[in-house]
């Protein structure tokens, strides 16, 4: 499903990729499958994404899909690196 609610985080990811390309920084994504047991009585599968820039862990995110987790990590990475994202 490529619905409109997925598009909110895509801007962060593309902005991050653009920034990393401009700075000539290497990126590597790592993913782990996790289980979120916060939902009462159910275990919800989820993903954790970790972003490494030039071999150093910069940010991480969590979501119900890899894409959502990656977008969360991208948003946090931009904050950590001090990159100002217009409209956020």
Image: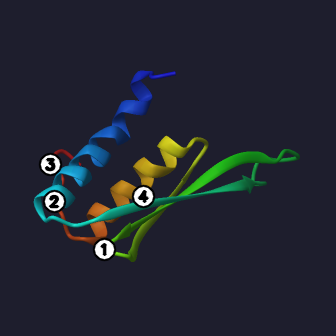
| Marks 1, 4: nearer the viewer | 1
Q: CA distance from mark 2 to mark 1?
A: 21 Å
Q: In the displayed structure, does residue 45 sit left or right of residue 14?
A: right
On residue 73, the disc is 4
| Marks 4, 3: nearer the viewer | 4
Q: Position of residue 6 (x, y in %)?
A: 43, 32
Q: In the displayed structure, does residue 38 sit left or right of residue 20?
A: right
Residues at circles 1 and 3 in contact by the CB criterion of under 8 Å: no
Q: Earlier in the sequence, mark 1 or mark 4?
A: 1
Q: Earlier in the sequence, mark 4 or mark 3?
A: 4
Q: Which residue is mark 3?
A: 86
Q: Position of residue 73 (x, y in %)?
A: 42, 58
The outermost residue toward the left is 22
Which structural element holds mark 4?
Answer: helix
Which residue occupies 23% across, 49% down?
88
Residues at circles 2 and 4 in contact by the CB criterion of under 8 Å: no
Corner quadrant of residue 75: bottom left
């Amino acid at each position: 499903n490529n619905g409109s609610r997925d598009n909110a985080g895509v801007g962060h990811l593309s902005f991050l990729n653009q920034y990393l390309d401009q700075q000539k920084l290497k990126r590597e994504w790592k993913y782990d499958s996790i289980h979120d047991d916060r939902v009462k009585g159910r275990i919800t599968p989820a993903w954790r994404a970790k972003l490494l820039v030039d071999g150093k862990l910069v940010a991480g995110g969590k979501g119900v899909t890899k894409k959502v987790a990656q977008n969360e990590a991208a948003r946090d990475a931009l904050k950590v690196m001090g990159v100002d994202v217009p409209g956020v």
